[in-house]
Image: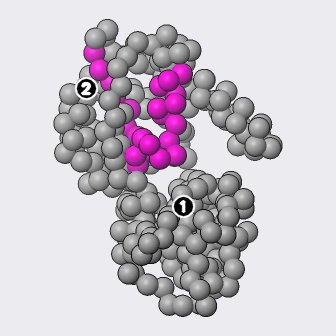
Amino acid sequence: MIGIGAGSPKHVTVEAIEALQAVDAVVALDKGDSKDDLLGVRRQILAEHAPKVRLVSVVDPPRDRQPGDAAAYRAEVRRWHSARAQLLTDALVGAVDEGGSAAFLVWGDPSLYDSTLRIIDRMRGECGLECEVRVIPGITSVQALTAAHGILINRIGEAIHVTTARNLPATSAADRRNCVVMLDGGAGWREVSGPDTYMWWGAYVGTDMQVLRSGWVSDIGDDIAELKASLREQHGWIMDVYLLRELDGHEEPSRL
């Protein structure tokens, strides 16, 4: 498991390069033409750092993106993970001899809102794969976002909360004081923002397509929602991340 960063090939660490050069093959999910950029970054990393390592791609199985309530959502994700696990096991066993090694190149870091480790557990438990797992950390989109904006992720002595847009409406006011939001298929900031909510937003962070915006949600929230829809139509996909921060009394945003 190799974390490859938020999109820039320069995010790949020395440790990741050394691990990549030592494997027999890289196994990756092909998410279709609309997300070919994601597979393209993996090809670029291999070409630059490990040109002799084979890339084995597997067509990602379909998933219901609107399964209903929370229970239905979790059930659909579990079904999807099982389907992925079988396909990836078959591809890995077919590409790598017994005793060999393969790598999964994980966008960002394997520990943060990525399911590859869960899928590997299913590959072992449901598909009978016998393997040892090593994890190489990577730069997350959260780090890439704050670096691009030149800000700190938290204020002095305050916590930082990381969540998904699906869970944002149920997030407490205390947790929303400094809140990073990931996996937003829409414009979740509209549901929770007040007059003192400031947002630092980024799409495709760390890539050549990076787009950044910041400001009071009351001023820029609708514009960013329109921009996000436009970018998705232009590229066929979008990944964005943002930091919401409550600034008491509409105080000026601080980098300190």
Q: Residue at x 29, y 53 (%)?
A: 11
Q: Residue at x 59, y 86 (%)?
A: 248
Residue 23: assigned label: 2
Say what amino acid the circle numbered 1 marks.
Answer: His
- Disc with the residue nearer the chain's start (1 vs 2): 2
Residue that numbered label 1 is attached to: 161
Can the viewer see residue 219?
Answer: yes
Residue at the (36%, 75%) spot, across then down: 150
Place of residue 256 in the rendered image (x, y in percent of width and height, measured from the top left): 38, 81
Image quadrant where one finds the N terminus: top left
Task: Reply above or below: 95 against 67.
Answer: above
Residue 112 covered by magenta stretch: yes
Q: Is residue 99 magenta?
A: no
SS assignment at label 2: loop
Residue that protrudes farthest toward the front in the picture:
157
* Residue located at (39% from left, 81% from top): 255
- Can residue 149 be seen here? The reply is no
Which of the two residues, 43 or 103, is positioned nearer the viewer here? 103
The mark closer to the camera, 1 or 2, is 1
Q: What percent of the width, then of the height, locates residue 73?
A: 73, 39
**Horizontal arrangement in the rendering, residue 55 relative to residue 16 (left or right):** right
The magenta stretch is 100-122
